[in-house]
Amino acid sequence: MRTYLVTGGAGFIGSNYIHYMFKKYDNEIRIINVDVLTYAGNLENLRDVEDRDNYTFVKADICDRDAINKIFEENDIDRVVHFAAESHVDRSIVNPEVFVQTNVLGTATMLNAAKKAWELPDGSFKEGKKFLHVSTDEVYGSLDDDPNAYFYETTPYSPHSPYSASKASSDMLVKAYMDTYKFPANITNCSNNYGPYQFPEKLIPLIINNALAGKDLPVYGDGKNVRDWLFVEDHAKAIDMVQEKGRLFETYNVGGHNEKQNIEIVKTIIDVLREELDDSDPRKAHLSYDLIKYVTDRKGHDRRYAIAPDKIKAEIGWEPETMFNEGIRKTIKWYFEHHDWMEHVTSGDYEKYYSKMYGNK
Ligand code: NAD
């Protein structure tokens, strides 16, 4: 039975990936999820898998060398899928250091532990072992002027925020391990994900949550920044396919072919909510574009990100399957049906953070 070590599996993409993998492989695989449970890590995301015999949760910091080495010593890990990171750009602008700590040093710790466990006396690596580093399109910088320009795997790195700089640094470390040691790894650089279990500091769950509560819908600057949106389950599938069919040492860009301005996203959510809510539902009464409030732009806000997922399509046969209209409806429905989940995550530290960023409106 193949054993996966997933880092950051209690977060948004990590928990969706674990669901996807158990749905696909059921009892054919074993998953060990290592997560320190920051504000973004939530074991409620994994309630339906926690009783499985082939699932183990380990609470540990990826920067804790002894704890990570111990996991490798006690288990014959075949695959590492490395999600754990500080992931929110706004937080990186307020407090960059923790991004360097987790994203750069944490990745170095993971690489070292895997190398130590997998390396043979002659410097080669045990057969079949693979490390996948999950990264972002933000490392490529911003596509400001040319609407026909896209990020390719060959696009030079030009990160602007402390978040993207820390992710770029971690990518470089993985590349250095591949170049220096022939360490068996891949990197995936993905566009913005959306879907169930996303912490409501990120645009889509933030807008759904605020719209249902009748709160202001904060939109940065002129609202015209463009992001390429990918349904999270499609991303989970891409990661699995890269590990199964990709060429080692390669980078694959993963994108949704779904470029949208932020303001379009916000208006779509309002429109879909108005369609879905019953006329008698009191939450419908206040739901209109009047809730939209433009707020001071994010410092150094990148204008446009857009991935060209040509290589992953040509080499591996992966393509995004969920078009935005379908994905956003699925997502909104999920947040509707998981009202308790939203209440739990918005009650504690998140509330304090939210009021610091946007006030109490
Ligand atoms: P998230 O913030 O929802 O989850 C991060 C998880 O990592 C949390 O469970 C958290 O507790 C854990 N974690 C943080 N620091 C840790 C540490 N020191 N030790 C152990 N665990 C730690 O993030 P996400 O949105 O799920 O993103 C996952 C990965 O995908 C990240 O590497 C991110 O850079 C990348 N990514 C995200 C997106 C996106 O749109 N969300 C897009 C492209 C790439």
Image: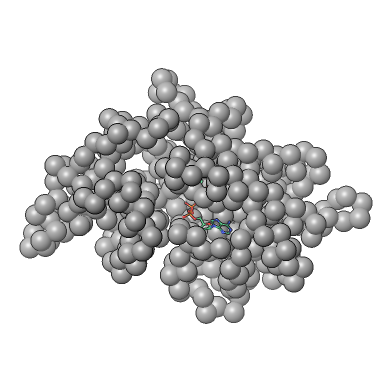
Whole-percent x and y of residue 182?
79, 44
Q: How is the image coloured?
A: one colour
In the figure, is residue 167 to the left or right of 249? left
Q: Quadrant of the N terminus?
A: bottom right
Image position of 280 with respect to 143: above or below: below
Q: Is residue 327 visible?
A: no
Residue drawn at the location 56% of the way across and 55% of the way down: 84
Would you identify the image quadrant in which residue 31 lies? Answer: bottom right
Q: Is residue 257 left or right of residue 242?
A: left
Which residue extends farthest top?
A: 145
Percent coordinates x, y for residue 2 in the rendering: 69, 67
Is residue 146 rendered to the left or right of residue 140? left
x, y percent for residue 193: 43, 48
Q: Nearer the viewer, residue 116 or 178?
A: 116
Residue at image position (59%, 79%) is 53
- In terms of image quadrants, where is residue 71? bottom right
Q: Residue at x 54, y 32 (%)?
A: 159
**Can residue 19 be seen in this snapshot?**
yes
Q: Is residue 101 above or below residue 347?
A: above
- Where does residue 134 sit, x and y in percent of width and height? 58, 48
- Asked if residue 12 is positioned above or below residue 290 in the image, the reply reads below
**Number of numbered tags placed on the structure image:** 0
Is residue 205 or residue 62 the one in the foreground?
62
Closer-to-camera residue (213/20): 213
Q: Residue furthest right?
A: 122
Q: Residue at x 51, y 75 (%)?
A: 50
